[in-house]
Image (cartoon, rainbow, N blue to C red):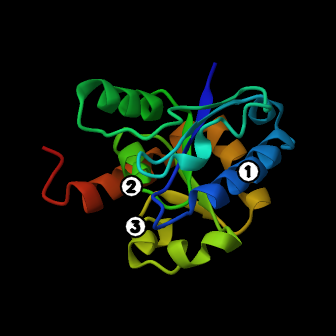
Amino acid sequence: RPFVLFTGSSSFISESHAEVGFVRRWIEAVRSSDDPALRSMNIVVRPHPYNCHAWDPDPLADLPGVTVFPRRGYNLVDEKTRADFFDSIYHSAAVVGINTSAMIEASIVGRPVFSMLAEEFTGTQEGTIHFHHLLPENGGCVRFASSIDEHVRQLSERLLDPEATRAETERFIVSFIRPHGLE
């Protein structure tokens, strides 16, 4: 079955315990969606490799259709770990995060990418220069919502029509990732 991937951020962007609380609120909002497909969508939470301490033991184990993988720290230097990271992005229907480089990596493989304003992370979202480059109005590909409710609506719309973000994502790849050409 399809799944939405939540990609965790470094401790510089989101303290691990605060991120766990935010992800739980986000999942509750997704599970309350008017869209039955989104409501029942599987969710994989992938903590940042260096910001895993609050994810083990699994703080979301009580939520059906949700898994945290991996829950312990890891390093993306070995082939298996890199493959797991790639596969989690590639096989997802969409990628959600607060502010993480995985959003750029998700756009490279053509996945729709989402974020939403979270009061506890305002300084590390809107307060960072690089985050603004990811927003569509600046040529980016991250659908950014001002609230979790708006985000859930955006996510539902994009999951119904995944091609809707393809042109936007391709423009971002050509201008930001490969400005000297896709070749």
Tell me the residue at 48%/65% (across/down). 136
Is 73 left, or right, of 52 in this rendering?
left
Rendered image: mark on residue 139: 3
Tell me the residue at 40%/79% (across/down). 129
Q: Residue furthest top?
A: 1
Label 2 element class? loop
3 or 1: tag closer to the N-terminus: 1
Residue 143 position, x and y percent, is 57, 58
Is 43 left, or right, of 76 in this rendering?
right
Q: Is residue 164 above or below residue 88?
A: below
Whether residues under marks 1 and 2 lie with C-beta atoms below 8 angstroms apart, the answer is no
Report the amino acid beneath label 1. Trp
Tell me the residue at 67%/71% (across/down). 120
In the picture, residue 21 is in which quadrant? bottom right
Circle 1 sits on which residue? 26
Residue 148 position, x and y percent, is 75, 59
Residue 106 position, x and y percent, is 42, 44
Report the amino acid beneath label 3. Gly
Circle 2 sits on which residue? 101
Q: Is residue 3 above or below residue 145?
A: above
Label 3 element class? loop
Quarter of the rendering occupied by the N terminus: top right
Q: Toward the viewer: 104 or 22?
A: 22
Q: Toward the viewer: 93 or 161?
A: 93
In the picture, residue 90 is in which quadrant? top left
Residue 183 position, x and y percent, is 12, 43
Nearer the observer: mark 3 or 2; the answer is 2
Whether residues under marks 3 and 1 lie with C-beta atoms below 8 angstroms apart, the answer is no
